[in-house]
């Protein structure tokens, strides 16, 4: 019995060293996995977005593009969004790093945090809101920064929506697309590209 205790005591340092080596290997493996997940072509989701990485692929889609703003938001007059992530409320400048909010009725097609680029407006948008969009799965409702009276903003929303309705939408775009930062509405004056 004393021999068994001595043998066990003698092996404790070896057991501790083996456990230490296993821990180091596990940590090294986790670091390697983390570095692979952050490769240059992977866009990491924002802190409040779903924990799914989106890969930049410039997928070209065709869908309806409509607009909404604070006058026809829910609740009316607010900037409230369903999926606060990059923004706490609807907004953005339209650049790759600060895309404007957009809404979709199809979070399976456009999960929260998905970026799109709309060539006609030369702006990036990010899915942060739900809408009652009813014109197909690719229908997107783009946030229009309000500037003017509610009726001027609503008139501009209608003017920016094309008669044919179908437009090119680039899902998961890269950062290389041109950006036009001129406001689509300013003091009630609508600029239709």
Image (cartoon, rainbow, N blue to C red):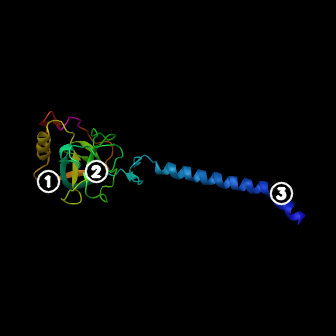
Write down the region rendered in magenta: 180-184
Q: Is residue 124 left or right of residue 191?
A: right
Could you tell me how far apart the alpha carbons at marks 2 and 1 are, in whole angstroms?
A: 20 Å
Q: SS for tag 1?
A: loop
Residue carrying label 1: 165
Number of numbered markers: 3
| Mark 1 surroundings: few (<14), some (14-19) or many (≥20) residues within 10 A | few
Examine the rendered structure and indicate whether residue 35 appears above or below residue 109: above
Q: Is residue 172 magenta?
A: no
Examine the rendered structure and indicate whether residue 5 appears above or below residue 159: below
> Magenta residues: mostly which secondary structure?
loop
Residue 20 place in picture, x, y as percent = 69, 52
Give the mark nearer the N terminus: 1 vs 3: 3
Q: SS for tag 3?
A: helix
Residue carrying label 3: 10
Give the mark nearer the N terminus: 2 vs 1: 2
Residue carrying label 2: 129
Q: Is residue 193 visible?
A: no
Q: Nearer the viewer, mark 2 or mark 3?
A: 2
- Image quadrant holding the N terminus, namely bottom right
């Amino acid at each position: 019995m004393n021999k068994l205790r001595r043998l066990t005591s003698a092996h404790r340092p070896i057991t501790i060293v083996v456990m230490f080596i296993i821990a180091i290997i596990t940590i090294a493996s986790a670091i390697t996995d983390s570095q692979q997940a952050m490769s240059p072509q992977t866009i990491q989701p924002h802190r409040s977005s779903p924990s799914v990485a989106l890969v930049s692929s410039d997928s070209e889609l065709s869908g309806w593009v409509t607009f909404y703003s604070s006058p026809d938001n829910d609740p009316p007059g607010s900037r409230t969004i369903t999926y606060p992530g990059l923004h706490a409320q609807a907004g953005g400048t339209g650049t790759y790093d600060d895309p404007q909010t957009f809404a979709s009725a199809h979070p399976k097609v456009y999960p929260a945090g998905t970026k799109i680029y709309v060539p006609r407006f030369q702006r990036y948008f990010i899915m942060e809101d739900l809408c009652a969009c009813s014109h197909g799965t690719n229908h997107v409702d783009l946030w229009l920064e309000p500037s003017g009276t509610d009726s001027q903003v609503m008139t501009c929303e209608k003017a920016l929506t094309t008669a044919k309705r179908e437009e090119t939408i680039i899902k998961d775009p890269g950062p290389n697309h041109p950006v036009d930062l001129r406001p689509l509405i300013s003091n009630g004056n609508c600029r239709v590209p």
